[in-house]
Amino acid sequence: ETGVTQSPTHLIKTRGQQVTLRCSSQSGHNTVSWYQQALGQGPQFIFQYYREEENGRGNFPPRFSGLQFPNYSSELNVNALELDDSALYLCASSLVESGTGVEKLFFGSGTQLSVL
Amino acid sequence: GQNIDQPTEMTATEGAIVQINCTYQTSGFNGLFWYQQHAGEAPTFLSYNVLDGLEEKGRFSSFLSRSKGYSYLLLKELQMKDSASYLCAALDSNYQLIWGAGTKLIIKP
């Protein structure tokens, strides 16, 4: 158990619709990142939030947006869905390990989004 | 550009040893991670290297050579449960993780 939960686990949408994916991370984990993972590929970084502000963004269009809330939950919103948006969406919170200083990512189990 | 290369798929026998290689090209470097991902599940942390050399952790070891832009994950005494994808990820100068596509490891009895 990573302490990171995502909902829903599976979702089916049609092209042009909008979707909101949710993530709840561990208390004290101030940083949350969102990734898109296509089948057979590694995770692609979408963006990162730190203390409710966007702290970095990957090569994704503006129709991918996010929010982070004070209660360590966050959202990924995708507008105008396209077929290529079909993928596993992973949320990860991070914590710097005391002693080693290593920042570890704790992933949720993901939301499998299918766009038809 | 930034790039991570690792083999797409490898096959090994239960009880044997396997080495999964990874080469990386990133703008700056702040460490290399290995993650394990079982089918349909989230990645889980295996190891982190930032200095050259071998880090051993039970049956799993990870090696890094910064001058060569090269890392490997060594799995000993393979078990069937080790069948999974193994993802290599490098931390660039902006502290963003650049991920490889993963190596699917198939363990045969």
Image: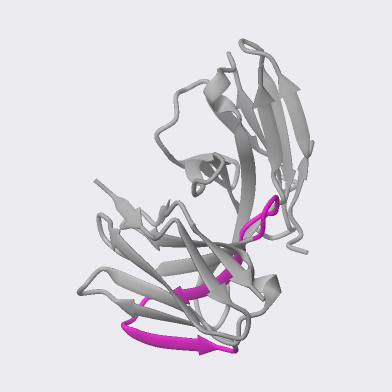
Q: Where is the N terminus of chain B found, in terms of image quarters? A: top left
Q: Which residues are magenta?
A: B38-58
Q: Is residue B5 left or right of residue B80?
A: left
Q: Where is the C terminus of chain B found, in terms of image quarters? A: bottom right
Q: Quadrant of residue A67?
A: top right
Q: Position of residue A12 (x, y in %)?
A: 74, 24
Residue A39 or residue A37, whichever sits in front: A39
Please say whether residue A36 is one of the residues in the magenta stretch. Answer: no
Q: Is residue A10 left or right of residue B69?
A: right
Number of marks present in the image shown: 0
Query: Image point 49% across, 49% down: which residue?
Result: A42
Q: Is residue A67 left or right of residue B17?
A: right
Q: Position of residue A79 (x, y in %)?
A: 59, 17
- Residue B13 drawn above or below residue A16: below
Residue B67 or residue A47, whichever sits in front: B67
Query: Image point 59% across, 32% down: which residue?
Result: A66
Residue located farthest toward the top when viewing the structure as drawn: A16
Residue A30 or residue B60, whichever sits in front: B60
Residue located farthest toward the front when viewing the structure as drawn: B109
Colouring of the image: one colour
Q: Position of residue B87 (x, y in %)?
A: 50, 60
Q: Quadrant of residue B89?
A: bottom left
Query: Image point 25% across, 54% down: which residue?
Result: B27
Q: Position of residue A47 (x, y in %)?
A: 50, 40
- Residue A79 drawn above or below residue A106: above
Residue A2 or residue A24, whichever sits in front: A2
